[in-house]
Image (tube, grey):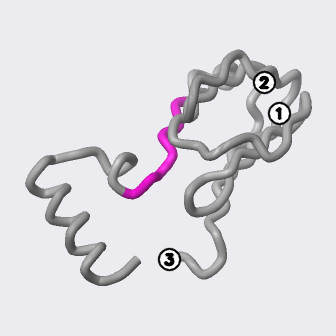
Amino acid sequence: MTRIGRRLRGWTNGVLDLPQDLLQEMPRITLIGNKELYIENHRGVLHFSSGQLKLALANGSLEITGEDLVIRNILGQELAVEGIIGEIRYKESEGKS
């Protein structure tokens, strides 16, 4: 991102007080216990099995591992997963800071 773009986003956030997930295309992850997981702002499912889910993000990927994973619903950029969530791993794209 260019210096002007970063400054504009910083100014927009300060003036409008918008959440960072909207401004920087970051995922919003909500975990309820280890049974339910809600993810917003993803870019699509890269891999799914009962033991692993991998999602594309704007600046990387998100890997969820567990047991008996089931995608309950997908609505646009929102996704709900049920099962026994064991691990959530955020992998940023190489070259990004």
Task: Sort mark 2 into few (<14), some (14-19) or many (20+) by Cα contacts within 10 Å.
Answer: some
Q: Quadrant of residue 36?
A: top right
Relative horizontal placement of residue 46, taking residue 91 as reference (left or right) = right
Closest to the observer, 35 or 62: 62
22 falls in the magenta region: no
28 falls in the magenta region: yes
Relative horizontal placement of residue 41, taking residue 54 as reference (left or right) = left
Do callouts 1 and 2 mark residues in contact (Cβ within 8 Å)?
yes
What separation in Å lies between label 1 and label 2 (alpha carbons)? 5 Å
| Disc nearest the viewer among 3 and 2 | 3
Find disc 3 in the rendering and name its residue: 97
Q: Tag 3: residue type?
A: Ser
Q: Quadrant of residue 47?
A: top right
Is 28 above or below relative to 10? above
Q: Position of residue 67 (x, y in %)?
A: 87, 27
Dot 3 falls on a residue whose secondary structure is loop
The count of marks equals 3
Q: Which residues are magenta?
A: 24-30
| Disc nearest the viewer among 1 and 3 | 3
Dot 2 falls on a residue whose secondary structure is strand
Find disc 2 in the rendering and name its residue: 84
Do callouts 3 and 2 mark residues in contact (Cβ within 8 Å)?
no
Relative horizontal placement of residue 27, taking residue 48 as reference (left or right) = left
What separation in Å lies between label 3 and label 2 (alpha carbons)? 32 Å
Q: Position of residue 16 (x, y in %)?
A: 13, 48
Task: Sort mark 3 into few (<14), some (14-19) or many (20+) by Cα contacts within 10 Å.
Answer: few
Find disc 1 in the rendering and name its residue: 66
Q: Tag 2: residue type?
A: Ile
Which numbered disc, 3 or 2, marks the residue that appears first in the sequence? 2
